[in-house]
Amino acid sequence: MLQEDRYEYMGTAQCEGAHDESGLLSHTPTFSESIIEGGVNHNKHKPKLTKQFLQKLEYLEEHNINGLIVFEMLGGNLLMASSKYPQAFPLILNTVMARFRVKIVINYKYLFDYITSMYNQHIKPTGKYNAENKNWPGQAGPDGKKGDYIRPFDTESQEALYYLKMIKRNRQSKTAIVRQKYIHAGVDPRDISILDMTVSHQTVLTALLCDHLPGASGACAHARAGTFPIPPKDKMSANPSFPINYDILATAAWKDGLVNTTNLSRGTVIQAIKARQEKQLNRTLHDFPKTCMDTKKIQKLLTLSIEVDRNLFGTSQTREEALTQKFWDGKPTKLCSVDTNVVLADPEWRDWFANTTTMTM
């Protein structure tokens, strides 16, 4: 469909294991289309562009066709990691700019959404859970890997803290920092647009095709009609996240000696807790008593989110009110987790755990 609008998907420049948004444009969930030989993670100090990519560039130039390259997360995480991958970014950009006018689209979301998504990506992805957390903490499985605890958000992740400290230092959002990197690299500021998902009721794909790709009217129409072919969302994520409250409660009960680990696996207990909460009690994982991030830290995160939004878009009472509303609406699920002390002090839950040898789902 993009080809009908004279756009050709060129490939990706993203780290292995990233959420692969390239499937939105390529129609296939794959990491094999990296424009860097061996991928971004390979030979990072002396990267080479693939022959296929260079051949595509020649073809596009000859036939006057637009090319699309997907940087990690459609926002350029590769640029943020330019000290880790010092040569890949200028190699790609300089090669393309030598032949084409470059238009950059950078997505933007609220700082608090970004920080919590960093937690989702690095602390509770399904891949990490399957690899390390299928066993009870400290107990090794057949592969020799020992189980571990899933840390609730209020303990904060080091990865998220790293970015939060960087943003505190610069007082700018990641989007603004990436934009400056492109400008410093020689891209005309007029050719850089911000895909602001905080004010859009469209999907990322529809907003990109309809508002940021000149002439992509056919693809835009298909996106709005829901007929633009894309892979299932779970097929585009190398590390999709999962709800952690059931796991946190299961391991807390195990730590308190309430679970017979001889007869029950960690996964069985998690599913049994889920079944009791949702089927027997007719509640959700969000209905547990909660423990949240420190109140002062929550307020600081909100204040900083407002500041970096203002620095990028200017002062707007409407934007600030919308940001604040979304922040507090999302707090119970994004900044809090199950309070295991309260739940495990409940006589009904303790009685239920006492029958763990007969747990059924």
Image (cartoon, rainbow, N blue to C red):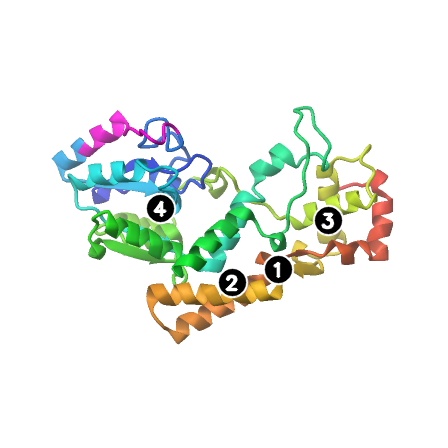
Task: Please report the bounds of the magenta region as a residue range.
Answer: 42-57
Q: Residue at x 83, y 42 (%)?
A: 356
- Residue 158 location in percent, x, y? 54, 47
Instruction: Characterize the local packing of mark 2: few (<14), some (14-19) or many (20 or more) Cα atoms within 10 angstroms.
Output: some
What residue would you read off at disc 1? 293
Cα–Cα span, label 3 and label 2: 27 Å
What residue would you read off at disc 4? 76
Label 2 vs 1, first from the N-terminus:
1
Image quadrant in which you'd find residue 271? top right
Q: Amino acid at mark 2?
A: Leu
Q: Residue at x 34, y 54 (%)?
A: 177
Please give left or right for residue 356 compared with residue 238 in the image. Answer: right
Depth order, front residue of 213/5: 213
Q: Give the mark toward the camera: 1 or 3.
A: 1
Please give left or right for residue 340 compared with residue 348 in the image. Answer: left
Secondary element at tag 2: helix
Cα–Cα span, label 4 and label 1: 29 Å
Cα–Cα span, label 4 and label 2: 23 Å
Q: Amino acid at mark 1?
A: Met
Secondary element at tag 1: loop
Q: Is residue 358 magenta?
A: no
Label 4 vs 2, first from the N-terminus:
4
What residue would you read off at disc 2? 301
Q: Amino acid at mark 4?
A: Gly
Instruction: Characterize the local packing of mark 4: few (<14), some (14-19) or many (20 or more) Cα atoms within 10 angstroms.
Output: many
Cα–Cα span, label 2 and label 1: 10 Å
Using the image, tell me which numbered label, if any, was put on residue 249: 3
